[in-house]
Image (spheres, grey):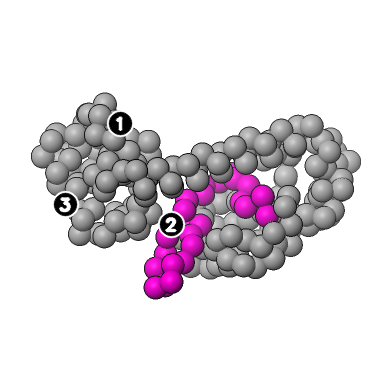
Amino acid sequence: MENLSKYYLFENLNEDQLKKLKKISKTYNYTKGTMLFFEGEKPKSLILLTDGILQVYKTDTKGNKIILHHFYPVSLIAEIVNLENMPYPASAEFITDGQAVLIDYKEFEQEFLRNPDISFMFIKSLTKKIKFLEDVITNNIVMNSTARVAKFIYEHEEDFIKMKKSQIAEKLHIAPETFSRILKKLKTLKLIEKNEDGFKIVNKEGLRSIYE
């Protein structure tokens, strides 16, 4: 087991607390394409993503994936299901090789959740999840395809550069062909440009004006 004190959630724990935490925690390595959990499954562990990219999604009646969010290290994953003792409302799949620390939640709740520092970090993490959900609702109900792409590029420049364009299209619930046409449109408007390394942003405020 690696040093848990290096993760933000546990950095204020003392040596005795870290020893207790180590006893109820296990580190697992995952390969690309591995499912971390399925929608409807009952949780047993508190999950801390420590490496890799995790894709959380729901599946519609036609079997299509509806991407809710991509999580990056270091993040708590679906902690609300532990707090509320409810099934996972979505599925999670590694889209790269990755690693996660799985912590026995019942033991964690009794030993650590009363710690003010840890409780505060839980609240901050849950607040981020609410913001993610608001973005999903806004992106899929209020905005058209061009506005969704412009907003994503503006707010996630690093992801735009690093992620495969097919992954971004899937995340935004846009057909790959439509996504390509929108990128050409944004390029024509001189908001982005393409070079040998891929696309880069030229006019960030111009992108923002499209979706606001």
Q: How crowded is the residue under tag 1: few (<14 C-alpha within 10 Å), some, or many (20+)?
A: few
Residue bearing mark 1: 212
- In the rendered structure, find residue 162 and report the number of the disc placed on it: none
Q: How crowded is the residue under tag 3: few (<14 C-alpha within 10 Å), some, or many (20+)?
A: few
Q: Amino acid at mark 3?
A: Arg
Q: Is residue 204 magenta?
A: no
Q: Amino acid at mark 2?
A: Ile
Quarter the N terminus occupies: bottom right
Q: Residue furthest bottom?
A: 62
Q: How crowded is the residue under tag 2: few (<14 C-alpha within 10 Å), some, or many (20+)?
A: many
Q: Earlier in the sequence, mark 3 or mark 1?
A: 3
Residue bearing mark 3: 181
Q: Is residue 62 magenta?
A: yes
Instruction: Judge from the rendering whether residue 19 lies leftward or rightward of residue 152; answer left or right.
Output: right
Q: Amino acid at mark 1?
A: Glu
Residue bearing mark 2: 67
The number of numbered discs placed on residues in the rendered structure image is 3
Local SS, label 2: strand
**Range covered by the magenta-colored residues:** 55-81
Q: In the figure, 4 relative to 165: above or below? A: above
The residue shown at (32%, 35%) is: 154
Q: Earlier in the sequence, mark 3 or mark 2?
A: 2
Quick check: marks 2 and 1 in contact, CB under 8 Å? no
The residue shown at (36%, 48%) is: 141
Local SS, label 1: loop
The residue shown at (67%, 36%) is: 123
Position in image of residue 132 (x %, y %): 49, 43
Q: Residue furthest left?
A: 188
